[in-house]
Amino acid sequence: MAPTVTRRQVAEALAAARAAGARTADAGVAGAATDEAGAARQATAAAVRTSLRWLAQNNPGKAVEIRVPPYGAVQALGGLTHTRGTPPNVIETDPTTWLGLVTGDVEWSAALADGRVTASGTRADLSALLPLPDLGD
């Protein structure tokens, strides 16, 4: 079992991803831009994985699979579970959209409507859980 994720860890990972993204946008030299892009990818990956773990730990279960390729996937929410193959309730999105949903910069309904989020199954709705609650401290 993975160690417990704290609100502080999620907030720090999100802040690091935002800062790394800003540094990448400001990088002007080709070599520096490559290094900054690598750092931004690592920070984004950490923020996605940490926030996914937070969501799963605070909404335990295996009824819905949330996928954010290429960085992570978790199963969460109580209800009917599955043990093999593709689960009946799947949510998938890209890392940028996921972090926007987590922080409240992107609304669930808007991301679903414009195709940034795909959701299949009757339980595949995270609108009541996102954005994540106060992540300070």
Image: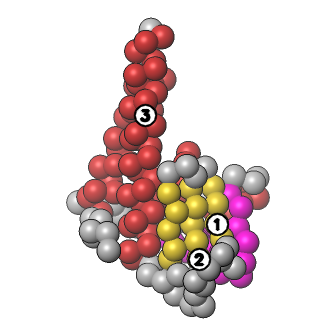
Magenta stretch: residue 123 in it? yes
Location of mark 2 (residue): 64
Q: Residue flagged by tag 2: what amino acid is it? A: Val
Residue at 58 percent of width and 52 percent of height: 69
Task: Pick whichever of labels 2 and 3 is earlier in the sequence.
Answer: 3
- Quadrant of the image for the C terminus? bottom left
Callout 3: SS? helix
Residue 69 in view, yes or no: yes
Marker disc for residue 91? 1
Q: Residue flagged by tag 3: what amino acid is it? A: Ala
Q: Please report contact status of discs 2 and 3: CB closer than 8 Å, yes or no.
A: no
Q: Position of residue 49 (x, y in %)?
A: 42, 56
Disc 1/disc 3 C-alpha distance (Å): 24 Å
Where are the magenta residues, as a range?
117-129
Horizontal arrangement in the rendering, residue 96 relative to residue 8 (left or right): right
Would you call the spot at circle 1 few (<14 residues within 10 Å), some (14-19), or many (20 or more)?
some
Residue 26 in view, yes or no: no
- Quadrant of the image for the N terminus? bottom left
Q: Position of residue 68 (x, y in %)?
A: 56, 56
Would you call the spot at circle 2 few (<14 residues within 10 Å), some (14-19), or many (20 or more)?
many
Disc 1/disc 2 C-alpha distance (Å): 7 Å
Q: Position of residue 127 (x, y in %)?
A: 59, 70
The secondary structure that dominates the magenta segment is loop
Give above or below for 111 relative to 77. Answer: above
Marker disc for residue 40? 3
Marker disc for residue 46? none
